[in-house]
Image (cartoon, coloured by chain):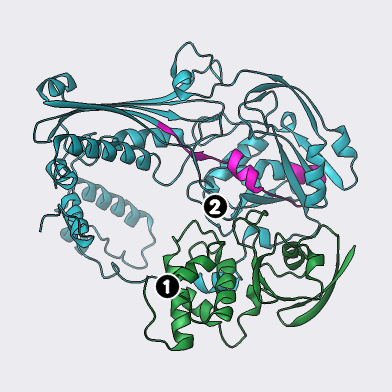
């Protein structure tokens, strides 16, 4: 038992591990000694320049891309495959009175039609399960699918969805997030309130901070909705076998999450669902949740044939997730020299019709909303609300670019008003090693100032310190 | 059905297709040449770019019948079993493509440009690639790759940089 003397002086977790090793020793057949475990504490090599930085990187799949040999989902065909199209509501808010699919079903070449009422569990979502696969009783935004058709050709499927007649009882849509924020506005997803996510970050005392400030700056910043526009549209192919197992090929970036959502919506155990991710032709956060997958799976079950659904470019714009538009109220108190003494922020995220990745976006936007600056007195509050618009979700940065636009714009406002160089005001306030983040995390490897200075020198900024 | 006879990548082919078939569908679904991609289907993104009689075109905007008797070159026609086309080599070496979906279209646009103008300026390259959208790369490495090919083809040391 020589190992014991080597590791006996280790910390408590190491000791626990050692004890479990001893148990293993009791259980293991006495054929060979166990190899020594790496119980030494690993020291992270922070701020070490790795040789990879600055090197030109190539991709292992770069040659196939250039040859046109990369097989994306639309590049393969399963024998007997049918093509599906989804009919979009085209109205922002309505109650569905009836859906008449008879004429579409009678069309030569149409093999099956699917409506929301036929979906075993018509709700899913990464956090709140508030999104229907196909709207059955209520339409929450114009991009909601209301019915789907599987036909022998894409052309016939496209014509058939035009023949589906949906009768709506129109409702007044809520389009302004600030209106949705008011408690008296009726809830889109009643009885749930329109505010479906809220976060507050408090640090110090803003009243004291503003009282000590020489100048106070207030402004509202807004950003717009942005679509990811992956060059490859969302698509999936499903094929159901006679053992009751469905195989889904999909452009999803998160197949494990997709698998659980598919199992939920189809009402079958996850072990019956096989998800195969095909090569993704651009994601940017937009391919993080299921879209067509349950639809093709159910159409395949109905028809006994593989079914493919490829989003059209309009589907992509109106029906997939987008970047959250934000309304950002900033109030910042500064000293004569430009030092930030207090900052108060209110963020209102327009969540669109469904939650999707709003909770993640809300959290990240709120945490980052104060900027990379040392601020003793801070109050940041963020809300995300439902509106009858295309849903918003994950997109590169989860809310970080929006708040960056706001706090950096305000830094420029302050610099201009106080006649300070925009570079100087940032250097005065920026994080340094050991600074505390708004949520109290001690920050390491901070090189904000060094980066700013180097960048300013490289592009010849007049105010750059030499 | 419409009967279409075209020369694809040097081979004469005759296909019967429904009259609404686009050149893109003809290539992808009837001739199994899936290198040209369907991105928008309305001529905005350029993922479907192929070369028809020496000109780069959006194959989603041309009907198959319109190319009857024409010469069509697709991405599959560039490399031989022995070697890559210089553009393909340059795109690989410069890491010009990321997800790769726009790649075949971009390379075909670049090929059409270099065939017509072997020593293009950066502005001309940008102009030639203007019809090809890419959401991953930011284009600069694609432009570098096209420049590198123009330089090597012409062994022209004095070509300007971006």
Task: Name the quadrant containing residue A337.
Answer: top left
Across and down, in percent, residue A109 comes to: 87, 48
Q: Are marks 2 and 1 in contact (CB under 8 Å)?
A: no
Answer yes or no: is residue A445 visible. no
Asked whether, in this view, residue B87 is left or right of residue A300, the answer is left
Residue A169 position (above or below residue A165): above
Residue A305 in magenta?
yes
Magenta stretch in the rendered image: A299-326
Asked whether, in this view, residue B17 is left or right of residue A296, the answer is right
Image quadrant where one finds the C terminus of chain A = bottom left
The residue that label 1 is drawn on is B144
**Element at label 1:** helix
Q: Chain A shown in which color?
A: cyan
The residue positioned 37% from the left and 39% from the top of the image is: A402
Which one is nearer the viewer's eye here, B32 or A163?
A163
Asked whether, in this view, residue B34 is left or right of residue A419, the answer is right
Across and down, in percent, residue A269 comes to: 63, 40
Q: Chain B shown in which color?
A: green
Which one is nearer the viewer's eye here, A20 or B56?
B56
Residue A377 in magenta?
no
């Amino acid at each position: 038992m020589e190992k014991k003397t080597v590791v006996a002086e280790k910390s408590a977790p190491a000791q626990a591990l050692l004890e479990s090793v001893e148990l293993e020793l009791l259980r293991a057949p006495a054929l060979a000694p166990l190899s020594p475990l790496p119980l030494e504490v690993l020291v992270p090599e922070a701020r070490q320049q790795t040789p990879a930085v600055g090197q030109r990187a190539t991709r292992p799949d770069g040659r196939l891309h250039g040859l046109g040999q990369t097989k994306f989902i639309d590049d393969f065909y399963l024998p007997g495959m049918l093509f599906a199209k989804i009919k979009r509501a085209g109205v922002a808010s309505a109650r569905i009175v009836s859906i008449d699919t008879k004429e579409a079903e009678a069309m030569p070449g149409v093999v099956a039609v699917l409506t929301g009422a036929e979906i075993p569990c018509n709700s899913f979502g990464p956090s709140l399960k508030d999104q229907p696969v196909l709207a059955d009783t209520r339409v929450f935004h114009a991009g909601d699918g209301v019915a789907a058709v599987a036909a022998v050709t894409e052309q016939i499927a496209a014509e058939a969805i035009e023949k589906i007649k949906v009768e709506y009882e129109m409702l007044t849509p809520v389009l302004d997030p600030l209106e949705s924020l008011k408690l008296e506005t009726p809830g889109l997803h009643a009885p749930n309130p329109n505010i479906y996510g809220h976060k507050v970050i408090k640090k110090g005392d803003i009243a004291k901070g503003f009282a000590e400030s020489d100048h106070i700056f207030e402004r509202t910043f807004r950003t717009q909705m942005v679509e990811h526009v992956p060059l490859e549209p969302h698509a999936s192919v499903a094929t159901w076998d006679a053992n009751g197992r469905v195989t889904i090929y999909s452009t999803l970036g998160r197949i494990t999450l997709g698998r659980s959502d598919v199992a939920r919506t189809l009402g079958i155990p996850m072990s019956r669902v096989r998800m195969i991710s095909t090569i993704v032709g651009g994601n940017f956060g937009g391919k993080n949740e299921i879209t067509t997958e349950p639809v093709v799976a159910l159409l395949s079950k109905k028809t006994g044939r593989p079914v493919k659904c490829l989003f059209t470019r309009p589907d992509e714009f109106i029906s997939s997730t987008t970047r959250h538009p934000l309304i950002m109220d900033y109030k910042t108190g500064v000293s004569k020299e430009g030092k930030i003494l207090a900052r108060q922020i209110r963020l209102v995220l327009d969540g669109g019709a469904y939650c999707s990745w709003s909770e993640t976006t809300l959290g990240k936007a709120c945490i980052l909303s104060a900027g990379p600056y040392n601020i003793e007195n801070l109050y940041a509050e963020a809300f995300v609300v439902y509106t009858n618009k295309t849903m918003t979700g994950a997109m590169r940065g989860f809310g970080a670019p929006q708040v960056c636009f706001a706090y950096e714009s305000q830094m420029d406002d302050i610099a201009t008003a106080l006649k300070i160089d925009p570079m100087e005001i940032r250097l005065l306030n920026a994080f340094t090693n050991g600074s505390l983040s708004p949520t109290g995390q001690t920050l390491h490897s901070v090189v904000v100032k060094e980066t700013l200075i180097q960048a300013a020198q490289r592009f010849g900024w007049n105010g750059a310190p030499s | 059905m419409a009967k279409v006879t075209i020369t694809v990548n040097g081979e004469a082919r005759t296909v019967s297709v429904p009259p609404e078939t686009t050149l893109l569908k003809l290539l992808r679904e009837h001739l199994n040449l899936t290198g040209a991609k369907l991105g928008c289907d309305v001529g905005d993104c350029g993922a479907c770019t192929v070369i028809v009689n020496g000109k780069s075109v959006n194959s989603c905007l041309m009907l198959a019948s319109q190319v009857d008797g024409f010469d069509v070159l697709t991405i599959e026609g560039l490399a031989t079993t022995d070697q890559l086309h210089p553009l393909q080599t340059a795109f690989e070496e410069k890491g010009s493509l990321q997800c790769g979906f726009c790649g075949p279209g971009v390379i075909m646009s670049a090929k059409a440009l270099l065939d017509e103008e072997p020593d293009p300026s950066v502005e001309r390259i940008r102009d030639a690639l203007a019809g090809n959208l890419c959401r991953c790369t930011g284009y600069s490495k694609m432009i570098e790759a096209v420049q590198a090919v123009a330089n090597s083809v012409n062994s022209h040391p004095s070509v300007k940089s971006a």
